[in-house]
Image (cartoon, helix red, strand yellow):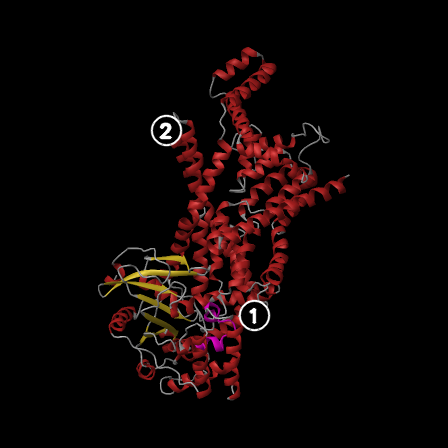
Amino acid sequence: MPAAESAATTTQSAAPGGRDPAGWPLIALLGNPNTGKSTIFNRLTGLRQRIANYPGITVEARQGLMVNCGRTMQVLDLPGTYSLSATSPDERVVIDVLTGHGGQPKPDLVVCILDATNVRRNLFLASQLAEFEMPVILVLNQWDVAVRRGIAPDPRALEHALGVPVLTTVGTKGHGLAELRQAICDSLAKPRRMRRIEWQQATLEAGETLRAAIRDAGGDVTLAEAHRIIFDSRSAIRERLPVDKDRLGELVQEARAKIRRSGLNPAAAEAILHYAHIDGLLADAIRGSRAMIRGGDESIDALLVHRVWGSLIFVAVMWVVFQSVYAWAAPFMDLIDAGTSWLQETVGGALAGTPVFASLVSDGIIAGAGGVVIFLPQIFILFLFIALLEDSGYMSRAAFLMDKLFGWCGLNGKSFVPLLSSYACAIPGVMAARALEDPKARLTTVLMAPFMSCSARLPVYVLLIGAFIEPVYGTFVAGWVLFGMHFVGLAVALPLVWFLNRVVLRTPQLPFLLEMSSYKIPDMRNVVLKMWEGGREFLLRAGTVILAFSVIIWALLYFPRDPSVATRAEEAFVAARSSEVGAAQAAAELADPASDSSVALAHAIDGAYLEQSFLGRFGKFVQPVFALAGFDWKITVGVLSSFPAREVIIATLGIIYNLGDDVDEQSEGLRGAMAAQTWPDGPRAGQPVFTVPVVLAVMVFFALCMQCGATLAVIGRQIGWSWAVGSFIGMSALAWSGAVLVFQIGSFLAR
């Protein structure tokens, strides 16, 4: 490994684009999507990278460090964009970085990554960048593909025409990276700026006039920024100017009118003039025919994007992804779960002399940490497949096939993979949504992911259906009920997404622009780095929040630990057991710690403590609210205790029904105890608590409620805590409303 890659593992906490006090140079990587920019970023920085949010927005940045020519340098991977027309948060980030706004210092050097197989289109972004008069290096990536197709441009001719260094790389293989590192060092020492477009007179005058008018109104922009305000309908530069918005709007209209009088449409002028400039620069640099077909890609696409065969292949691929996330992760998750249980027992036994501290460490901290780490296998496997699908070029084909299915509600085809993976677990699904370029689609996909029926809901469905549906209606009906429960969330989420996009956000529908990237063999180094990045970000960004949730819930379930509660529970148990087998026999049984009676007594005490805990008391307090859905206080406490993780309700019900927490959805003892429950008083005194309407209401509640602290933490980190809290409250309200509706209608029909 070159010294530039192997040196320094230092990290820094400056905001994206910020410099360390030591004055490290800032290198920004810019380019269109699918040019291999992130692959080159990974090659330059290795594991010395992190993800952070840009100030004031939820767009994420990747930044890292490299040691080059004996200097530590910051490398910033800017979001992929086709132009500097800032209509999305990602594009606005690029403008903010290039102009040094939003708390960001301007980069010392911009490395613009171009697809060597499509230089003309990629140079449009580079030509816009030249207007900002920044030091630039152009990199023709995927050079091997361009050479193989006979359309490789002449790098030396391009360098002469553009006035800046032009290098060739194959990012997936690391070819040309040593030359790039040297070029970065040379450009920092002797900056070179790309040859700018020569605007026609009317466009030049319009920009200068607008710039002077803004200065007179109290603002300050460069000529390049003035042109961006003229050409962009929703310019980030325009929005941040300290100028009256109405007055600024008048000035922009006057500038556009000047361009219009010259015979150009202001909406199309920039593209027309830039491409005319680019065509002049490329006259002697492009080899081969620009119209040359893409070779084998078209023949493969004829199959993979075919309406019938492409859809069948897509379903098969997605089934493999889903099955892998669901099944391949299971052994590793079981191993982590077993390790967590062993560690809990070991530490709990070692700290037995201090019961409160032992419970905190064992049931709070260790259990919480285990609840974080247990998701890592799913996250690693999901990001493995996402990286393989993206690097191979198939992801864009999958998005194309699925776009029409989701387009009506404001999502696009790329939302399908995150939503599908959310059926295994919403956490990797939410994290996978970061790959969506459209910020609105990213937001709605993240909010929709928790509605998918993840694997944590399955134990609840199996317990209730196996105990109350199958014995009455048979396995056929039970199977259809289980199948239907997996689509309750989806049926509710799609109309909500439509409402969110059309009524709440009211943002215009962005066109779904999709570039069919070339097929290629995935770079396994890049794949491993993406897996590592996904797992590390989950641990660092969500792990602390999840652990905090676990400790809080432990405290609510543990305190207050009044010894009189155990005394009363023991007296009641002894009295009941004595009436069954006699006082002498009961005393003999309880004298043996390993006897069934001693174990049952311990379970009874645990159940009494839970009932008198803060969470138990709160469950009884709010039970009248849940009574509308048919829940008694025990179901209510189980529901409340499962907000950190849905599957916790199984263990909680086991404790409440004096069976201990070592029960699962197949436990006959738990099913029998639930079936035997009756209402102790009130209008339903003596009637069974669990009827079919109640069972359906509980399952609907679990289908619609966000009972997962880990998911909540990841959403908060991905799109902001206001959205996370709003989603939690909204889903809880939906879950309660759905449960009440199902119970009330079911009870009415059952009369």
Query: Quadrant where the N terminus lies?
Result: bottom left
* Place of residue 471 in the rendered image (x, y in percent of width and height, measured from the top left): 67, 37
| Type of the residue with mark 1 | His
Is residue 173 visible to us here? no
Q: Toward the viewer: 731 or 521?
A: 731
- State the image quarter where residue 16 is shown: bottom left
**Mark 1, secondary structure of its residue:** loop
| Type of the residue with mark 2 | Ala
Residue at the top extreme, as displayed: 584
Look at mark 1 in the image and give the residue it sits on: 306
* Place of residue 59 in the rendered image (x, y in percent of width and height, measured from the top left): 45, 61
The residue shown at (49%, 83%) is 269
- Magenta part, dominant SS: helix
Q: Is residue 144 left or right of residue 551?
A: left
Q: Toward the viewer: 461 or 745?
A: 745
Provide the residue span drawn in magenta: 226-240
The residue shown at (33%, 72%) is 169
How many callouts does the rendering have? 2
Q: For residue 611: magenta?
A: no
Q: Can you tell which of label 1 and label 2 is closer to the viewer?
A: 2
How far is the residue under mark 1 from the one under mark 2?
Answer: 63 Å
Look at mark 2 in the image and give the residue it sits on: 350
